[in-house]
Amino acid sequence: MNPDQLHKRLQEGLGIEIEWSEGPVDPFYLIPSDFWVKAGLFVRDATDLSFEFLRSLCGVDYPDEKSILVVAHLFSYQHKMPLVLKTKIDRDQPKIESLASVWPAACWHERETYDLLGVVFTGNPDLRRILLPEDWVGHPLRKDYQPPNQYHGIPTTRPVVDCDGEQL
Amino acid sequence: MSPIIEPGPEGGFAIGKIDQLLNLARKNSLWYLLFGTACCAIELMQTGGPRTDADRLGMVFRATPRQSDVLILAGTITYKMSSRIRMLYEQMAEPKYVIAMGSCANTGGLFQESYSVVSGGDLFLPVDVYIPGCPPRPEALLEGLMLIQQKLEREPWLKKAWSGTPNQSDPWLKPRG
């Protein structure tokens, strides 16, 4: 199935207009955020698509557009083709329904996206930080993130010294 | 100073101060905690393997901090892991030593500017020996362990143990360099 056919199939399956682009690497389809889980269920269950494998789920911060893109990379082993779904959500109120009910693998990917970008996935069974300590403040992959000076008494920076011990 | 050891046909004898004899025993049973946080742990395992064979110097790995004398920081330390490492360190019985193995444990290494990586193990633990390398070869780690042996050989540990808590101003307790 070529990208154009895939686009038509997605539009008739969901009954809405879907933006899409050839993209620099893979073609991607911009799903409205209300249809995020519905689109996931559709591409998983439709027999001519059967994207049963969630390769990755992540987020991208666009502070200029005041938005965060949530990106899901899927693969269909049955039809041997990839699919990239994206959805745009508000940067100040980043909230979206969880895909964990569609692909259980999404659970930890969403935890990582929550940890690093602060996207809240409603319906995720275990939405905690995954890479950083649970009492960490802020979300480091946001473009305007300012790291703290210390964490539990551990300084986060190390003075750079030359071989004589002089600070550079 | 090491005690005078005189081997004999019927078993030998050793002459020295109690501290020296005590240190002789301590030096030859330097057990390290089998604990690694990243790729340096592979070299740590190799050090215990037959080619480098740390066993011949009395260095055996232990799977619990309660039986270990040395904590080897083998690998990248994240902030999330740092509190766990501190807990392991606090579970070890005195006297205890810390080796920072590899660039990451020394300074944060490649990941120093990262949001999640501690810029060096000495920012939250008293490190005794730093071993450069990425990762250091097993020979380098073995030399680091032998430096710990040299260090504890000079410690008047008995005096310290009897006087209660170790005195932090004691020059022997301070990391060298």
Image (tube, coloured by chain):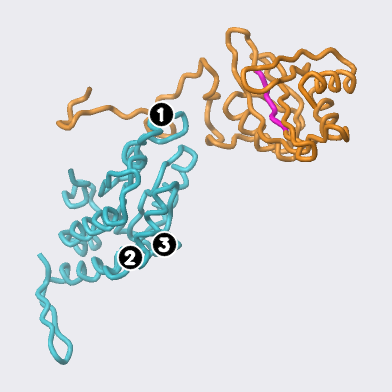
Chain colours: A orange, B cyan
* Residue that numbered label 2 is attached to: B51
Tag of residue B147: none
Residue B111 vertical placement versus A32 (above, below): below
Q: Position of residue B47 (x, y in %)?
A: 34, 60
Locate the C terminus of chain B and report the quarter of the image it occupies. Answer: top left
| First along the sequence among labels 3 and 2 | 2
* Residue that numbered label 1 is attached to: A150
Overall secondary structure of the magenta section = strand
Q: CA distance from mark 3 to mark 1?
A: 30 Å
In depth, the one of B120 and A84 nearer the eye is A84
Residue A14 magenta-drawn?
Answer: no
Three-letter residue code for mark 3: Arg
Q: Element under label 2?
A: loop
Residue B52 vertical placement versus A78 (above, below): below
Other-residue count near label 3 (Cα within 10 Å), few / some / many at <14 / 14–19 / ≥20: some
User: In the shown orientation, is residue B98 left or right of residue B24?
Assistant: right
